[in-house]
Image: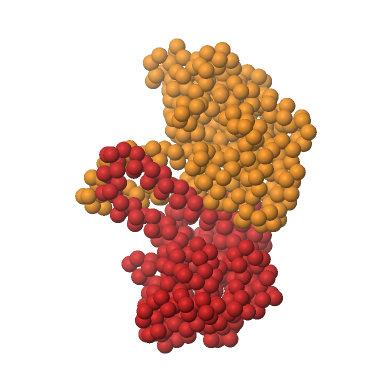
Chain colours: A orange, B red
Amino acid sequence: MTAESALTPTPAANAAGLPLALDAVGGDHGAVPNVDGAVQAARAGVRVMLVGDRVKLHAELSKYPGAAGLPLEVVDAPDVIGMDEHASDVRGRKDASINVAARLVKDGQAAALISMGHSGATMAASLLILGRLPGIDRPAILTHIPAKTGTVALLDAGANADVKATYLAQWARLASTYLKVVEARENPTVGLLSIGEEDHKGNAVTLEAHALLRQQAGINFYGNVEGGDLFKGTTDIVVTDGFTGNIVLKLAEGEARVLFGWIREALGSSARSKLGGLLVRGGLRTVAEKMDPGTYGASILLGVRGLSYIGHGSADARAVKNALLRAARAHQSRLIERLSTELSGPS
Amino acid sequence: MTAESALTPTPAANAAGLPLALDAVGGDHGAVPNVDGAVQAARAGVRVMLVGDRVKLHAELSKYPGAAGLPLEVVDAPDVIGMDEHASDVRGRKDASINVAARLVKDGQAAALISMGHSGATMAASLLILGRLPGIDRPAILTHIPAKTGTVALLDAGANADVKATYLAQWARLASTYLKVVEARENPTVGLLSIGEEDHKGNAVTLEAHALLRQQAGINFYGNVEGGDLFKGTTDIVVTDGFTGNIVLKLAEGEARVLFGWIREALGSSARSKLGGLLVRGGLRTVAEKMDPGTYGASILLGVRGLSYIGHGSADARAVKNALLRAARAHQSRLIERLSTELSGPS
């Protein structure tokens, strides 16, 4: 089963349920990949609200013959937070697409918010409009890293540069429930990212978090993991602060890009290797696809009272489609309700 | 010019100069790779003192016919700090190989200390016996990461889990002089590892360090760099705390290992790709070699009053040889004297 097929929702279930609110003008490439991805998701049976400038979105939609028959609707939002604006601009600009989309979720008109736009603005709008789940001090971005054993859920991937040890313990709990509910993983293991396997290795926050995680109910704590354990897939979940997590994530993506660049170069260096390159192209593509962030589509912001997904600004239509399928699936598994129940239990 | 050929010292110069002190029983595999690597370096004209259990080392050396004619000598050190012992054991065990090697450097009988043994013990012995350079609060491990543009010098790779912003500014200065002296790089650029290019992005320590680096004399500060900039080679030097640096380094190595594993698997998946795999093998090996930590051999501990190199416990003979060549070259360029002079200048 590929990552993508695992994402496909039961079409009937979602078509009958709530639509998803897509910030359809957010991201480096504006409406084009968003509308394309939404059309693809709609064809797979997912209902989507395209939130953004009405005129632009209708114009873009008109390029898809047959779009009129799909479960797509346009919700007007005349304003958009640009990629180079401040996240705090969210407060004053209620007609911005991200705010309109977040309110649709808050008001129960949409099942989830998905944006490839300004990440900081998406976090701010989610936090301000949706609020936090009970017992959660700060939401965290959970992202999936490809690993030898499947994928590893890494959080926080960048929402909180400075953290308290208690946040890490809360995130371990959120992520454990997330994997149980959305990926049906039984009793997922939690690793604390540090600089040695031994309990006493780490920085001040990690040492404190280690002690908290040892006592934390509702999680299966493995202990410390190191940088090399991420791709090895030693644990299902890896918790860390948002500074380290963001650097780890961008390094992992950057390294894969450079390595594949070197391999392409090496394969073009002689007639012999060029011929070989043609023969191995398919195999290398499979590996490159594992590393492509577009396969997952977007990362979830865990800890807010509603489904919120944050994608790459450079997302293409495939990433948008996969993010929508992922959000539809989380909605069907009643993720937010399950998280709320879990968090009301013993801590 | 390959990384290795760049390392070769002028044989005559070193053979005439001070020998290097190799902790010849340190590391996961004990004397075997250490003696093998030392023999190879000695054949290239580097004088080496093999520090460790005399009987063991002579037995190992006797396997190399012609070793008697090489610039190698054995210095007895009956004790060794095991890989699973505590770094603090260094204090009480003056006959441990790492302590004997460090004293040889302190007393001017050896040019540098090189160990593939317990990293913590090597740091502790270096700090306690050699002491710090003027104006340096904490030494840092500088390691080389392969990048699109050559290599990037990353520090701290793990000596200091918790840091003050002032350390980062001191390390930027050390690393700048290091690259000027040892790699003849003119005015090397310094990047501060963070979670956004903008000056105001980062955690508390990074924000403070950013301000200090802007004012720091004797460096060419580029600004913030992100995780993806490491392999891109955006700057010559990247400074960060030892927690993040260690995770980054181990992630980078682990990711390369897993990616190459996947590629090998993909190349064996069909008759077609197997044939192609044979044709591209040479090209892939070149890429894999770039990623191999053994190409650099060891990382330097910058900030102590003497040359100190820390290698992987799993180092093979090639890594030992390359570490010795690297140390000989740093000694020839009078790195420690140059760092002392530089640090006595305006700060």
B341 shown above or below A199: below
Q: Quadrant location of the C terminus of chain B?
A: bottom right
In the image, taking residue B232 as reference, residue A335 lies left or right, namely right
Quarter of the image where the N terminus of chain B is located:
bottom left
Task: Please report the residue visible at 62 percent of the width from the left and 56 percent of the height from the top.
Answer: A196
Which residue is drawn at the image coordinates 43% and 16% (left, top)?
A67
Q: Residue A52: percent from the left, percent from the top?
A: 53, 25
Question: How many marks on residues?
Answer: 0
Q: Residue B226 in the image: x percent, y percent?
A: 52, 51
- Can the viewer see residue A224? yes
Residue B267 as seen in the image, left or right of residue A94: left
The residue that appears at 48% across and 80% down in the rendered structure is: B58
Query: Which residue is outermost to the left?
Result: A271
Q: Residue A124 at what x, y percent from top left? A: 64, 36
Q: Does residue B136 appear in this view?
A: no
Residue B278 is situated, as x and y percent measured from the top left of the image, at 28, 48
Q: Would you place residue A296 above or below residue B321 in this image?
A: above
Residue B126, quarter of picture? bottom right
- Image position of A164 (left or right of B302): right
Is B23 situated above or below A251? below
Q: Nearer the viewer, residue B303 or A26?
A: B303
**Compared with residue A310, is residue B129 higher up or lower down, i.e. above or below?**
below
The extreme bottom residue here reads B16
Left or right placement of residue B40 versus residue A91 in this view: left
Q: Which residue is at a point 71% across and 32% down the rendered structure image? A: A132
Q: Nearer the viewer, residue A204 or B177?
A: A204
